[in-house]
Amino acid sequence: MFTFFFVCLIIASFMCLYRVMVGPTPPDRMVAIDILGIIVVGMCALFAAYKGRDFYLYIAISWAILSFVGTLALVKFLEGRGFDE
Amino acid sequence: MSNNFALGFVIVGVAFDLLGCLGLIRLPDIYNRLQAATKSVTLGTCAILFGIFLEFGFSSGGIKALICIIFIMLTSPTAAHALARGSHIGGFKLWEGSKVDKLKEDRESK
């Protein structure tokens, strides 16, 4: 049962990686990186229930914080290009 | 998992994650992809974390899952809004089938 959940989430992660690789414009890649971070948070939570230990949730919380900060940094890069025009 | 409610929440969350990433591949435009992927993946991950909370109960693991739910519900729509606004300001075009562009009308009217 847990194997099925992990396989579904890994398929979703590879869909995000496909969009990172193929995406025609830079914001497509940024959206895919943001979504990939949120999916990894869910996978860490499932792994905590699979192993029965709770310290994997520390990894989930810190991954969520780092993903949010990274997305905001990339967005500043996008808006900075608009100021030059 | 021991609890049936927890199992139901986890199944719903995994299904929402998978369908959101399918929308990330399938849709034609940056804004369509953003609005398909962000909302459903946020709801799916929050459902998975709530299932983990029901599994652990009010122990240290359950409280950490609740904190993670609150944090994701605060930050993920903020990041999506910043991405959409930043890509619109950065000059990336809408898909040619899109009819309404309220942000462009708002910025032209000022």
Image (cartoon, rainbow, N blue to C red):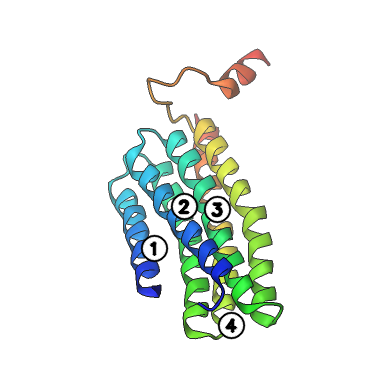
Quadrant for the C terminus of chain B in the image: top right
Marks 2 and 1, Cα distance to the nearest angstrom?
Answer: 10 Å
| Residue at the image point whose x is 67% and y is 77% from the top | B57
The answer to whether residue B28 is above or below residue A52 is above
Where in the figure is residue B109, as x and y percent of width and height?
65, 13
Residue indicated by mark 3: B42
Label 1 element class:
helix
Label 4 element class:
loop
Q: Is residue B97 left or right of residue B39?
A: left
| Residue at the image point whose x is 55% and y is 86% from the top | A53
Type of residue at label 3? Thr
Contact, mark 3 vs mark 1 (Cβ under 8 Å): no
Q: Is residue A70 left or right of residue B19?
A: right
Contact, mark 4 vs mark 1 (Cβ under 8 Å): no
- Which of the two discs, 3 and 2, labels the residue nearer the N terminus? 2
Same-subunit check for callouts 3 and 1? no
Contact, mark 2 vs mark 1 (Cβ under 8 Å): no
Mark number displayed over residue A54: 4
Type of residue at label 4? Asp
Type of residue at label 2? Phe
Looking at the rendered image, the disc whose residue lies closer to the viewer, 2 or 4, is 2
Residue indicated by mark 2: B16
Residue indicated by mark 1: A9
Same-subunit check for callouts 2 and 4? no
The answer to whether residue A70 is above or below residue B27 is below
Contact, mark 2 vs mark 4 (Cβ under 8 Å): no
Marks 4 and 1, Cα distance to the nearest angstrom?
Answer: 20 Å
Type of residue at label 1? Leu
Marks 3 and 1, Cα distance to the nearest angstrom?
Answer: 14 Å
